[in-house]
Image (cartoon, rainbow, N blue to C red):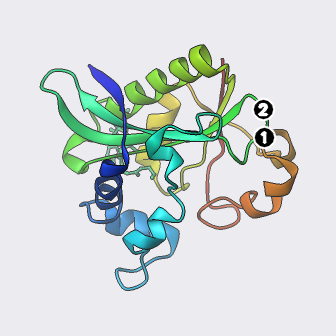
Amino acid sequence: MVKLVEATLSDRKKAYDWLFNSDFSDFLMKLEGFTRETMPAYEDFTGEYWDFFFDGTQPENGRCFKIVDESNNEEVGFIYYMAFHTKEGVAELDVWLKSLEFTGKGIGPSAITKLVQKLNKELGFQTFFMRPAKENTRAVNSYKKAGFNETELVAEDYYKPEFIEEYRKGGYGEGKDVFLLKKV
Ligand SMILES: CC(C)(COP(=O)(O)OP(=O)(O)OC[C@H]1O[C@@H](n2cnc3c(N)ncnc32)[C@H](O)[C@@H]1OP(=O)(O)O)[C@@H](O)C(=O)NCCC(=O)NCCS
């Protein structure tokens, strides 16, 4: 139904636009505490979504993939894993589709399942987590369908010591996310 295709540097602007200029962006930005005026510019995005996510030079630290609908070869979203900040064998995942039109059709869970299997098989990752905002019930439901379970976060178990302080509170502020875990 969907396949994952390695994203390249020329896809990065599209990844930004589908996150910040899509019809769900106002909802997501509100959760992150941004307004249209204060939202990250593309230049800020490149300072967080580093080159290695798009050029494949550091698979041990992370990589971004395009989600492609196999029925018509349409690109419908992005999914990526990060492991520069996590303990060995652990990866954090995140995913967003092109627009609301593509949500609610099982694309998210299918892409997540594919990425988990691929990372386990090819790079030996065994522990995966996702941290959607509590208020993003669509994302929480979707990730649960992909086999992730709500768990209490013990940051020391998942993050490298030097990243614990920065990452413990999550992307939406203390207590505002759901820690979802999957082990394979
Ligand atoms: C989060 C996301 C990747 C999930 O992928 P998906 O393909 O839509 O996932 P699903 O097909 O499982 O659908 C999500 C579930 O939420 C439900 N849902 C749909 N719209 C909803 C809404 N407005 N509020 C609450 N739940 C909703 C769906 O019914 C579905 O559950 P169901 O199949 O049990 O009915 C996708 O919805 C998305 O890109 N959303 C916008 C970006 C985002 O929030 N990304 C995550 C943070 S960056």
- The amino acid type found where label 2 is placed reads Glu
- Between circles 1 and 2, the one closer to the viewer is 2
Which of the 4 image quarters holds residue 130? top right
Looking at the image, residue 130 lies above or below residue 116:
below
| Rendered residue at 69%/22% (across/down) | 126
The percent coordinates of residue 129 (x first, y second) are 64, 37
| Rendered residue at 86%/45% (across/down) | 156
- The amino acid type found where label 1 is placed reads Tyr
Local secondary structure at mark 1: helix
Which of the 4 image quarters holds residue 154? top right
The percent coordinates of residue 65 (x first, y second) are 40, 36
Which of the 4 image quarters holds residue 83? top right
Front-most of 24 and 83? 83
Find disc 2 in the rendering and name its residue: 88
C-alpha span from label 1 to label 2: 9 Å
Local secondary structure at mark 2: loop
Image quarter hosting the C terminus: top right
Find disc 1 in the rendering and name its residue: 158
Would the CB of label 1 be found within 8 Å of ligand 1?
no
Mark 1 Cα-neighbour bin, 10 Å: few <14, some 14–19, many ≥20: many
The percent coordinates of residue 123 (x first, y second) are 63, 21
Reading the chain from its start, which is encountered first: label 1 or label 2? 2
| Rendered residue at 32%/29% (across/down) | 106
| Rendered residue at 76%/57% (across/down) | 168
Looking at the image, residue 79 lies above or below residue 127:
below
Using residue 18 as the reference point, say whether residue 177 is left or right of it: right
Q: Quadrant of ligand 1?
A: top left
Mark 2 Cα-neighbour bin, 10 Å: few <14, some 14–19, many ≥20: some
Front-most of 170 and 83? 83
Numbered circles on residues, count: 2
